[in-house]
Image: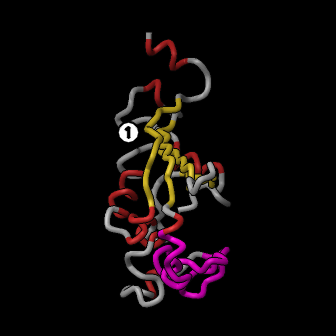
Amino acid sequence: MRGGAGRGDRETADRALVRAGQGEPEWAVGGSYQVVRVIRLATELWDGDSVSEQERIIGRRREGRWLDGAPTDEEPNFAADPRGRFTPLDSRVRLAVPDRRDPPPLVRRSYSYDRGDGDTGLVFSCFQRDLAMGFEAVQKRWASEAMAKYLLTTGGGYYFVPPPGDHWIDALR
């Protein structure tokens, strides 16, 4: 689900920017829906699991290599592993993008944080033209994932980022 990484500007815009004719007001065309989540990681619980269990839950080796042996800079072939022998069907990466040829229509980035006293986690941000097809579709697939017991969303929200320029301001008056 690494939307944006290594992708062209056209593909990134197609995934992230509202288009004419998708049912949004004309002034919103060229804008984007942003989702921000602050996610705390239960590090003590996570650290209590073996490395192999952590890798199974995530769906990658710690050094980044895919469980099916594919290098970090290539995509795993989930279609060749329909029963989840290499990459479990309930692993985080597999649920996020079940078909690597058709990733969710969003562009995302995560940043680690550490506030001390065991409060560590991620600040996750993504942009998409359609919340239901992007972020919300991934969230539904993650509802039953094994990783869920280690994560607690503590903040964030849904936002609309207007298109460049100020023509959208006139539409709001």
Using the rendered view, name the quadrant where residue 147 is placed.
Answer: bottom left
Q: Is residue 162 left or right of residue 139?
A: right
Residue 150 rendering spot, x and y as whole percentages: 44, 64
Q: Is residue 5 left or right of residue 108?
A: right
Answer above or below: position of 157 versus 136.
above
**Visible in this render: residue 70?**
yes
Q: Is residue 100 left or right of residue 165?
A: left
- Residue at 38%, 75% in the rendered image: 90
Q: Secondary structure at mark 1?
A: loop
Magenta segment: does it hold 63?
yes
- Residue at 46%, 29% in the rendered image: 28
Q: Amino acid at mark 1?
A: Gln
Q: Which of 6/125 is in front?
A: 125
Magenta segment: does it hold 56?
yes
The prevailing secondary structure element of the residues shown in magenta is loop
Residue 65 rendering spot, x and y as whole percentages: 63, 80
Answer above or below: position of 101 versus 52.
above
**Visible in this render: residue 11?**
no
Answer above or below: position of 102 versus 8.
below
Residue 119 rendering spot, x and y as whole percentages: 56, 53
- Residue at 63%, 52% in the rendered image: 116
Residue 78 rendering spot, x and y as whole percentages: 46, 80
Q: Which residue has dot 1 on it? A: 22
Q: Quadrant of the C terminus?
A: top left
Segment tinted magenta in the rendering: 45-74
- Residue at 50%, 37% in the rendered image: 32
Using the rendered view, name the quadrant where residue 95 is placed.
Answer: bottom left
